[in-house]
Image: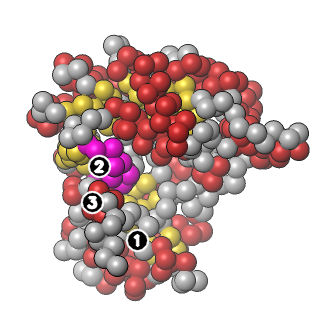
Amino acid sequence: MNYDEIIGKTAHSIPPSGIRRFFGIVEEDPDAISLGVGEPDFVTPWEIRDAAIKSLQKGYTAYTSNSGLKRLREEISEYLFSRFNAKYSPDEVMVTIGASEAIDLSLRALLNAGEEVLVPDPSYVSYCPAIALAGGVAVPVACSPENGLKPTPQAVEAAITKKTKAVILPYPNNPTGAVLNKAELEAICAVIKKHNLIAISDEIYAELTYSGRHVSVAALDGMAERTVLISGFSKAFAMTGWRVGYVCAPAEILGAMLKIHQYTIMCAPTMSQYAALAALVTGKESGFAAVEEMRDKYDMRRRFVVNAFNEMGLQCSEPSGAFYAFPSVKSLGLTGEQFAEQLLREKHVAVVPGDAFGAAGKEHVRCSYATGMAQLSEAMKRIGEFVASRK
């Protein structure tokens, strides 16, 4: 049977995730250290796990409403306003299967066939495939090292055509760690408003900024009515495996997303929703002490990793958010892919080639520092030896 004729053209054309490529090898190599997957090494705080256990003990195992537990949506609404001044009513909030489902829903709800979405390059690997699966066309906006790996309003405007529908704003950024400050966001949002576009703001790393408070796109003047805000609990609350996120949008947009969610998902897992509720309630009571503690530890690792890369001669700008370093390997005469393949083979350290996140990352690699200091120290030692052998 010729499966090339059976599998849909869109699914067939989408490449596999560049993040996952090396990790089958890593799992079979007991000496390997992985700096590839963006997953916190912290265990979900006990009070969050305990809330999920108690929800099961009480028999809370039925579906929730499609939008999610009402009290959870109320807490998300309050959290976004108190932490980031983003104003959404509980009726403008929907709980999803992680932020990933929210990305997919927002694109499918917004796009008609052939419409374009601007995506900063480099950016998270899922955006472009999700745009294609929604029938749209991803248009990269190259972010150069000279501009701090950030998009400029001029570059955004230059990429806009009559088919442009939305702009993805993924800040703090994966893989670069770049953060757009208020003035930078306002300049780009002025272009978005000028051309009557929608901003899809992926703020999953909002709590992981290292200088000042995160600025939400939805909190900027005139942007709430044209912003789809995506976030979740995976990164800041160490809840990756719980698969619970949320999306906030004007009621009309959220209603379109909810219809798709109803037919494909029904609702996010009930016990995960109770865990997320506990994360916000106990977090609020403690001033989000657990989040602050994790961020402080990431900050220490961030400074260690960036300093190590620069000392070994790999230019690495200091990430302002998230938990990734994005060093350039250009000085070695290697592409990111060549560097990653040779490093894994010779030194048993896994990093992700930068071009997995877009063509602009070709001469970079992404290294997650969401792992313990002992592993990071050993990984940096091995990478330093590898780099020295290439000079």
Quadrant including the N terminus: bottom left
Q: Is residue 167 left or right of residue 75?
A: left
Q: Nearer the viewer, mark 2 or mark 3?
A: 3
Tell me residue 102's x, y (percent): 47, 39
Q: CA distance from mark 2 to mark 1?
A: 21 Å
Which numbered tag is attached to residue 9?
A: 3
Q: Which amino acid type is marked by label 2?
A: Ala
Give the residue number, with chain letter if any, for mark 1.
21
Instruction: Give the crowd class for mark 3: few <14, some 14-19, many >=20 residues within 10 Å.
Output: few
Quadrant including the C terminus: bottom left
Q: CA distance from mark 2 to mark 3?
A: 11 Å
Q: Is residue 244 left or right of residue 194?
A: right
N-terminal label among 3 and 1:
3
- Tell me the residue at 50%/56% (across/down): 38
User: What span is in magenta?
Assistant: 122-136
Q: Which residue is more in the foreground, 207 or 388?
A: 207
- Tell me the residue at 27%/35% (across/down): 112
**Element marked by disc 3:** helix
Give the residue number, with chain letter if any, for mark 2.
132
Instruction: Give the crowd class for mark 2: few <14, some 14-19, many >=20 residues within 10 Å.
Output: many
Q: Is residue 213 left or right of residue 122?
A: right
